[in-house]
Amino acid sequence: MSGELAEPMMDMQYFTRGPTLEDFASILGFQDASSNPRFANLSEDSKTITISTLQSNFYTMLGPTQQNLVSYKFSALYLPELVKRIHNPPGFLKRHTPYLAKYFRSQDPIAEEGKSLMPVLAERLIRVAPRLEVAMASNPDYEESAFFASLVGSSVEILGDLLNIFIKEPKGSPILLPQATKKALIPCLKKWEIIFSAASVDPTLGGMCRRTRNLLEGNALQISAANRLRKVLKNWEHCGNPGYVKPFDM
């Protein structure tokens, strides 16, 4: 058998059952490979296929309660590691949990890398913007357009969340965007706002770009909304899962 065909492949059970916390932790390398040997020695291509399948099964095979159990515990254990993956791609899982605001506002040393994530995301968007816009314009097919739109939307969404979370940060803070970065990013957001608002792919992305741009431009109504959101999430020192009040060192 050739080397290509001999490459280890995923056990088929992972394509036919709902994924677990351990599945995601193992394929991402957050757990020792020996804890889940089925993920050991996979090529990058095989890992990509496996991750996509696990993520798809997460939404289609698990109910809302099971999804929350997996995502809350995963965030509690591995959110700092996921942030490191954004600093040093690849990373894949976009999942909203109450741990997000808690992690980025934490003063614990383990959350330190989160403080520099906003400029990293913004500069990355600026860098890839021309290529993404060309790709979207030259791929009118719905699935292709949706793919490129999701690349922009995912980063803009996280950037908007960070702007909301750090709305009270003083001017000049290294957590915030430098003026030059703001100046370069705002025209991109204006352009995407128009493109996505007129597109059938996902018009909500247009609103997301508009709200993020408004925060960067200091729009009073948007800043007021961000302050209201911050008040809702102000109890940083407790677990964000509704009804669960165990403190930080859980």
Image (cartoon, rainbow, N blue to C red):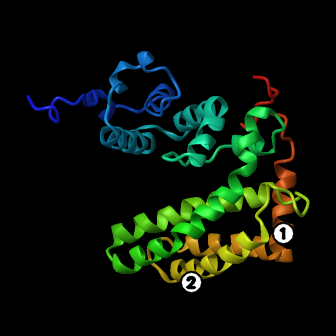
Query: Helix, strand, or loop for circle 2?
Result: helix
Q: Vertical placement of 247 versus 156: above or below?
A: above
- Mark on residue 223? 1
- Outermost residue, right side: 170
- Of 40 and 249, which appears nearest the observer? 40
- Mark on residue 194? 2
Please name the residue shown 58% across and 62% down the image.
124
Using a 10 Å C-alpha cutoff, classify the residue at mark 2 as few (fewer than 14 neighbours), some (14 to 19) or many (20 or more): some
The disc, 2 or 1, on the residue closer to the chain's N-terminal end is 2
Q: Vertical placement of 228 versus 88: above or below?
A: below
Please name the residue shown 34% across and 75% down the image.
139
User: For the residue marked with disc 2, what is the amino acid?
Assistant: Ile
In which quadrant will I find the N terminus? top left
In the shown orientation, is residue 203 left or right of residue 117?
left
In which quadrant will I find the C terminus? top right
Could you tell me if the residues under marks 2 and 1 are in contact, i.e. CB atoms within 8 Å? no
User: For the residue marked with disc 1, what is the amino acid?
Assistant: Ile
